[in-house]
Image (tube, rainbow, N blue to C red):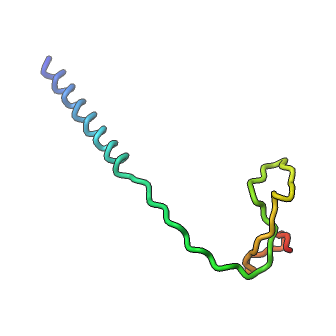
Amino acid sequence: MESRKVILLVGALVIAASTAFMARSLIVGSSAPQATAMPMAAPVNGPEVLVATKSLPVGTILDATSLKFQPWPKELVENAYYIK
């Protein structure tokens, strides 16, 4: 009966060690990709649309720094936009 306990213990240790090794290889193997700078976009020739300069949660009181006009591609302008 003692040999069954030893075999069970050795089997459990082998499974635990292999699981730990696989988890470690998953964690160590995945490194974050390097960030690269995006090329500068060509200037947009189109109307200027009113956009928010920061996140505006519900109830935010607007002031002059909350909004600005920004050039927008003409083909993406919709009727709901405020155009300068």
- Which residue is depicted at the point 34% across and 51% down? 29
Q: Residue at x 75, y 75 (%)?
A: 71
User: Where, quadrant-wise, is the N terminus in this rendering?
Assistant: top left
Please state, as top left, top right, bottom left or bottom right, where the C terminus lies in the image.
bottom right
Q: Is residue 33 toward the left or the right of residue 79 in the image?
A: left
Residue farthest to the top, as pictured: 1
Q: Give the answer, above or below, for where 30 lies relative to 10.
A: below
| Left or right position of 35 against 22 | right
Furthest toward the bottom, the residue is 45
37 sits left or right of 22 in the view: right
Which residue is found at the position 25% from the left and 36% from the top? 17
Residue 45 spot, x, y in % from top left: 73, 82
Front in this rendered view, residue 49 or 7: 49
- 59 over 48 or under it: above or below: above
Q: Position of residue 51 (x, y in %)?
A: 78, 65
Count every numbered label the image shows and give the total.
0
Give the image location of residue 59, x and y in percent: 84, 47
Q: Quadrant of residue 4?
A: top left
